[in-house]
Structure formats: C-alpha cells, structure tokens
Image: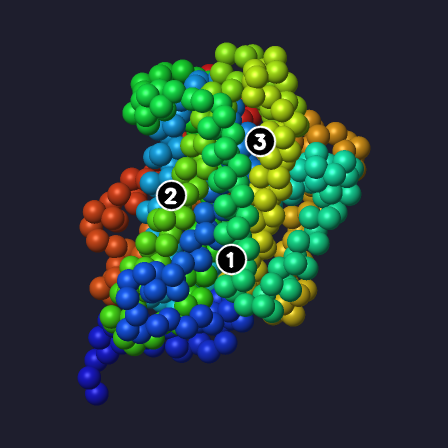
Amino acid sequence: MAKPSRKDKQVMFAEETPGSKSLDEINGSIAVPKDAGFWRTLFTYTGPGILIAVGYMDPGNWITSIAGGAQFKYTLLTVVLISSLTAMLLQAMAARLGIVTGKDLAQLTRERTGKKTGIVLWIITELAIMATDVAEIIGSGIALELLFKIPLIVGILITAADVLILLVLMRLGFRKIEAIVAVLVAVILLVFSYEVLLSNPSVGDILRGYIPSPTILTNRSELYLALGIVGATVMPHDLYLGSSISQTRAVDRKDRAAVKKAIRFTTIDSNIQLTIAFVVNSLLLILGAALFFGTNSDLGRFVDLFNALQDRQVVGAIASPVLSMLFAVALLSSGQSSTITGTLAGQIIMEGFIRLKMPLWAQRLLTRLLSVTPVLIFAIIFKGDEAKIEGLLTFSQVFLSVALPFAVIPLVLYTSNRDLMGEFANRAWVKYTAWLITIVLIILNIWLILQTFGLTA
C-alpha cells in the first residue's frame, strides 16, 4: 500500500473524528459557488471577518484610543496602524489553520498538549474571554443608562439576555448573525465619521501621526498608552474565533484548489474588515485629539466622554446633546456586537479545551453568565458607581496580556508545521515575521502588566 502523502494526511486528520467539528451546528453550513466570478465568491466568503473585526473595536479600545489622542494628539496613530497590521497577519494564520485542518485552535491545542494542560489552558483562556466581556458588558450597561436612564445594575442584567438573542439568531442561520453585526459596525463607523468630520481635524497632522515618532519610546506616559492600545487590539479570543468560523463555508478539503480558494477569499474578507476596524480606531484617536487635546478634560470614563461632547467649554461650538446621544448609540452597538462574538468564542474554547457536552442553549448561557457574574457582583458592591466599575477595564487588559502568549505561540507553531499544514504551512518570511511579532507582543504585554501594578522604575 502506498504511503499517504502530506495532503492525504491532512484529509485523514480532518475526517477521522466525526462529531468533533468546531461549532458543529454551523460548520460548513454556507454553500460556496464553484464557478462564480470574483465578486460573487467574495460576497459568499464575506462575514466571518466582520465578526473578528468587532473584537478590535470593542469598548475596551475606546477609552485608550480617545485618551491617546487627547493626551498626545496624533502621535499614537502609528501604534494603531502597526497593531492593525499585526492583527491582519495573525488572523489570516488562524483562518488558514481552521480551513486546512478542519479544527480550531482550541481543539488542536488540546490534542497536542493533553487533558490536564488543556484544562489549565481553558481556565486561562476563559479568564481572557471574561476580561474581554467586562469591557463589553460595562460599555453596554453604561450606554443603556445614558440613553434610557436605566440603572447600571439593571443594564448589566439586560446584557445577560444577549445570549438569548444569539440563540434566536442561530436558528435563522449564521448569515443573519453576520449581517446584524455588520449593521452594528456600520453604525459605529458612521457615528464616528460624522463626529470627526464636525471636529475639523488637520489632515496634515493626521498623516504625520502615522509616521513613527521616537517620543513613543522615550516618554513614559506615551509608551504606557501605546502599550494599552496594543494590548486592547490584539486579543487572544479572536484567534480562537477566527480559526473556527473560517469553517462555516462548505469546503471540500480533498480538493486542493477549493482549499486554496477558501484561504484566499477568507483572508481578503478578514483584511477588509480589519481595515474597517483600523479606520474606527483611528477615528477614535483623531476625535480625542481634535476635540480634547489641550483641554485638560478628564476623559477616563465613558460618562466623561458623553458629557464632554455636549459641553461648549470643552469641544466648542459643535457641542450638542445629539453628539452625546450618537456616542452612546455607537457604544451600545459596539457592546452588543462584541458580546455576540464573545459568546461564540466562549463556546469554541469550552468545546475545544474541555470537550464539554451539553445542550447548546445551556452552553451559551453558561459562557455568558461566567462573564456577567463578576461585573454584576462588582456593581452591587459599589452600588452602580460607574467610576469604580470602569476601573475594572484596566485590570481586564492584564488578563488579556497574560493569555495572549498561550494563543499566539501555538498558532505560530501549528501554522508553521508542514506535517499538519502541508503546502499551506507558513512561508519562511511569514514564520519569522510571526515569531518576531510574538516575541515583541510578549515583551510589550509583560511591560504593560508591570506598569499597571507599578512594578517598573
């Protein structure tokens, strides 16, 4: 009998364990036209990228980006650009891993590390998802309070019902989820485009902001905010999510050309949507620079930003309640879109790392409650004090920093493994660039942790 080729091994690896598909109810649920033109094919593959992109513009990014503009004008735009390019590379690798192997990053990590290690990694990753959800829950809760005067604790409880919305949407099909998240992202993009347009920023200064400045490394406060932007941008749960939902399109893994096409169009979709996330994060920083630089305003909280946008002493003649309400609408859209993807990511890591078998509704509800509970307890203890509750955002970034290497290192290892990926393994330049990025991210995140706890000189 002939020895199986690497390509054959890939097919066997993807098919030998029936019933172990990632997000089994939607895996391969969307048909792909075989002989369609470029644009029709791209439309079919468009969707997963937008679910990934919302993680890069969630409420956790808002305060950091706006504060970066308010304190250092446009200088940190270069950090936004570099972070976005890094995200594009890592997410493309995650998508390729899922398409080629038929398994997500959590499943592969569990298979190649064992049960005990898998449980430890699940705990770390679950904490990271909870940390991500903290910003989303707080953002949604505060947005509900600002828009409808709903008490913060009640708003947080309402966010727990997001999972029920997701369950209904899953019955309607995954394309519906993609479409709804796309609408929410469009709201965010339009709101901040409008507010930035009103703020009349200097185009020349903006363009110069994308050129690296040495002050980012020499100014301690500037470096800290730069690290915060990086830490809030490259998040571990998005890598698990990307490796899973890249499999929602029906691809014949026995067909090399089909796999190659799936990788190509999934990567294009991912890069387009992450470019939108880059634009949104740039708009946030530009808004902070154009409206608040030099005003000495306290912009440490969402409520501060909401109030500042209607204060003529802060933002001048363009101040109005409409700007504030639009900000709150965008905040709610950001929180809602991020919670949908966060819940999906929670299911992926739960199934992948600990292979927990339970009804889908119970699994999603458990994932959501794990995230809502600590925020709710904190809100009750401090009686809905927004300032103290938003203080959780800082510490949530620490958990993300701790968890990041546990996602990035396996991703680079697996996608560089020719026995696993065959001809679709990372090319040399991609592999070495990915390792360089990984090392830099780890160093930066360790520095961010030390700075957060005041352990640096």
SS at badge 3 = helix
Q: Earlier in the sequence, mark 1 or mark 2?
A: 1
Task: Find residue 394 and name its label.
Answer: 3
Rendered-image quadrant of the N terminus: bottom left
**What amino acid is labelled 3 in the image?**
Thr
Is residue 237 or residue 201 the one in the foreground? Answer: 201
SS at badge 1 = helix
> Which is closer to the viewer, label 3 or label 1?
1
Residue position marked by numbered label 1 in the rendering:
179
The residues bearing labels 3 and 2 have C-alpha atoms spaced at a distance of: 26 Å
**Which percent across, then down, holds residue 271?**
35, 49
Mark 3: few/some/many CA within 10 Å (<14, 14-19, 20+): some
**Which percent across, then down, holds residue 251?**
36, 72
Residue position marked by numbered label 2 in the rendering:
275
| Residue located at (20% from left, 50% from top) | 428
| Residue located at (21% from left, 47% from top) | 429
Q: Locate residue 111 relative to residue 173 in the image: left or right.
A: left
Q: Earlier in the sequence, mark 3 or mark 2?
A: 2
Mark 2: few/some/many CA within 10 Å (<14, 14-19, 20+): some
Given the current orientation, which residue lies at the most extreme bottom position?
Answer: 1
